[in-house]
Structure formats: structure tokens, C-alpha cells
Amino acid sequence: MQTLIPFLKSYTAFHAVENCAALLRDAGFSELEESKPWQLEDGKAYFVVRGGSSIIAFRYAAGGAFRIIATHTDSPCFKLKANCVLADERYTRLNAEPYGGGLWYTFFDRPLAIAGRKIRAAEGVLREELYTSPYFVTIPSLAIHMAREANDGFAPNLQTELPLAAIGKRELAELFDGAAQDLFLAPATEPYFLGEQGELLSSPRLDNLTGVCASMCALKECETGSETLIAAAFDSEEIGSRTRQGAASDFLESVLLRIAAAENIGDAGYARRIAGSFLVSLDNAHALHPNHPEKCDLTNKPVLGGGIAVKGHAGGAYTTDALSFAVIGEIFRRADVKYQTFYNRSDMRSGSTLGAISLGKVSMPAVDLGIAQLAMHSAVETMAVSDYEELVRGCAAFFAASFTLGREVRFA
């Protein structure tokens, strides 16, 4: 929790990656650049950033298979358009569009931070810098006296319900100071604990900064063994992953190829390496809702405090199959990590994760899992503190496990 709470204040994917990089640098990881040659040393730790919002970190073991945990850095929010300030003598508002599939009514009447990155030109050089506004904005609801039907169903028009930034006409000059920018309106509610024992945590961005933080912390704390251990955190999952820094890009494949190239093993050797590798797709799941138990599957009802949720789906939305379930189950059993199973109701559309998308580039056995939470894609989500603790232990157990994949799976 000590690391997670400040990490949840990473308003955007750019902030999350910068916080990951700081965590890794403090642990002795060296930064690589995609545009420069790599000189890898056995037993050393490295990370590489793409687009400022995706990061892949690894502990290199020469000749070892890949053990990968993949997460995502982005969450639903709003993104500012160009020329976004709408100002008259009464109010200043901001023209924004939705990013991802948020539970949008929950974003009303909450503090929203303007945050992201700017690309600034100085002396012939373009440099990226993080930006966070020194103030908050909000999307004000229409009073119940003026919208009597609001409690019967609220479907906001996302073009007309604009954030209020100031009273009176303001230029908000710091937003448009000559720099190119990717700026978002992100929920700024502080994380808070619930319950007599503080057993629940509510915060923005639990999906999926919990996974990013847990995997990076586990990688930071573990030792390099006989396999190359990798924590990959991708941007753009909430919008389909089809960007140059998303899971559908060549980012992961490129890093794996360059690791293999350091050993000069050729295409056949790389193929063998991939065949012996394993991917954990780490993204949160839906917990049994106490007020809506009918929304859960009949026999797979993950609950808050029940441990890590391992996710399955017949249509391939999740990557788990019998083999990968057995592998992760054995790893968790040996480490005494609690876990449970999640399936959607058969008459409900399933969400998807970056696991299946990643396998389109690098095919290997894979499993989908994550923390069971309430109010996914809300401005504030809720989870059990104990489940995050299990997730950290589960990530560490996966990185520490020694097993070989083939027609049989053998554990050391």
C-alpha cells in the first residue's frame, strides 16, 4: 500500500510511466532507447519507454525463456481537443471528448485535473514534459429541479456537458503556450479507505494502475534467475490498443527480438524461446456486486477479499485455457496465494484485455487474471486491500517460479 497509494495519483499514462521509470532507476535498472544499439549483460536489469506512455522493464538472463506480466497504463477519462477553451463573460468551459468507455455519470461533480504531456520547442530541440494543472475543473450536473427525469436514467450528451474551468472569461494561457500537447481531464479524488478496519480502498484508476504497480514492484524486488523476467505496461488499452505504444503494436515483439539478438540465436532459436515462454495478462475483473448479484455468473462469483481472480472466456476474450490455468494454479498453490475464478454471464458481452491482442504478435501460453473490483470504469472504483496484497505476492511468485514448457510442464 505504501507504494500503491501515491502511484494511484498518476493522472495519465504519461505520469504512470514516469513514476515506473523513477521506481526502476532507484532499483538500479538502466534505461535503453529503441533508436540506439543495446548492449545487454547477463543478470542486469533494463527498461525502455515508447511514446512516453508505455514501458517495458526486464531482468535479463542469457538463454532463458521469457516470463512476462503485461498490464496497461491508461484509464477512461476525457481528452481536451485543440482550441478547447470556450469563454464568454460569464463562464470558461473546456471542449473535451471521451477517452475510453467510462461510466460517465460518475465523472460529474468531481474534481478533475488537467494533466498529460506537452512537447515544447527550444533552441531547435523538441522536448517532452509532463503537465499537471495547479487547479481542478468540474462537470456540473443539472439540478434535479431542472431535470426531474434524471433519477429515471441519466445518459449525458458528452458534447454539451462540458467541464467548467472558471467564472468569467479566462484565456487559460498555460494550456496553449505554443506547445503541442496530449492533455486529459482525469479524476482527482484522493484514494481513501473504507470499513471499520480499512479493508476496502476506493480510488480513481484502480483499473489498471494496481496491476502496473504490482508487476513493477515485483520485478524490482525479485532477483534475476534462469529466465528473462519482464513487466510490460502498455498505453491505449481503453481505446483498443491499436496505437504505436499499444499492445497491438510491435513494441513487445521488438523488445523480445532485440533481447534474443543479443545472443545471436537466429530465427529458429527465437521461435524456440517463444515456445517456452509464458504471459500473464494482468487486468482487473468484476467482483460480485452486493446489490446486483444477478449480474454474476451462476458458479463463478469472485468476491472482494477472495484473492486474485483468474478469468476465462469461451470466445477468447481472455487467454486462459486448461494448461495456463493449471500452471498459474500450481504457482499460486506453492506460494500460498489465494485465487478465485471469474466468468461473465453467458448472456452478457465480455470485456477484453490486452492478453489476446499481445498473442497476435508473440504467441505463447497465457493466462488472464486481476483483482476483483466494484464500479469498473467509474471515476472512483473500489477493491479489497487484501486482494492487492495477494496480487503483489502472486506477481512475485510468478517471477520466482522455475518451470519448463513442452508437451509436459515440469516445475523445479
Image (cartoon, helix red, strand yellow):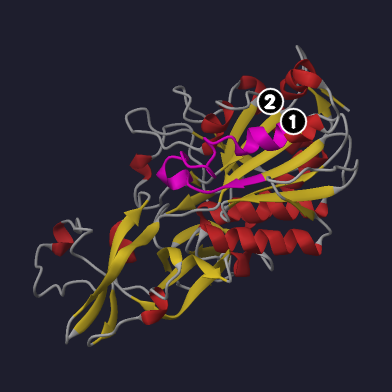
Instruction: Kindly indicate the quadrant of the structure image that contains residue 71.
Output: top right
Position of 392 relative to 350 (above/below)? below
Q: How crowded is mark 1: few (under 14 residues within 10 Å), some or many (20 or more)?
A: some
Q: Nearer the viewer, residue 1 or 290?
A: 1
Q: Position of residue 379 (x, y in %)?
A: 40, 62
Mark 1–mark 2 Cα distance, whole angstroms, equals 6 Å
Q: Are marks 1 and 2 in contact (CB under 8 Å)?
A: yes
- Determine the secondary structure under disc 2: helix
Q: Which of 406 and 152 is in front in this view?
A: 406
Position of 4 relative to 396 (above/below)? below
Tell me the number on the disc at residue 326: 2
Residue depicted at x 56% and y 54%: 53
Magenta region: 232-257
Residue depicted at x 75% and y 58%: 24
Q: Is residue 269 left or right of residue 71?
A: right
Tell me the number on the disc at residue 210: none
* Residue 238 counted in the magenta span: yes
Three-letter amino acid code at disc 2?
Answer: Ala
* Residue 135 counted in the magenta span: no
Q: In this view, does 215 lie to the left or right of 133?
A: right
Report the residue marked by disc 1: 330
Q: Position of residue 135 (x, y in %)?
A: 42, 82
Q: In this view, does 86 lie to the left or right of 192?
A: left
Numbered label tally: 2
Q: Name the image quarter holding the N terminus.
A: bottom right
Q: Find the residue positioned furthest to the front.
A: 124
Q: Can residue 329 be seen in this view?
A: no
Q: Which of 203 and 127 is in front in this view?
A: 127
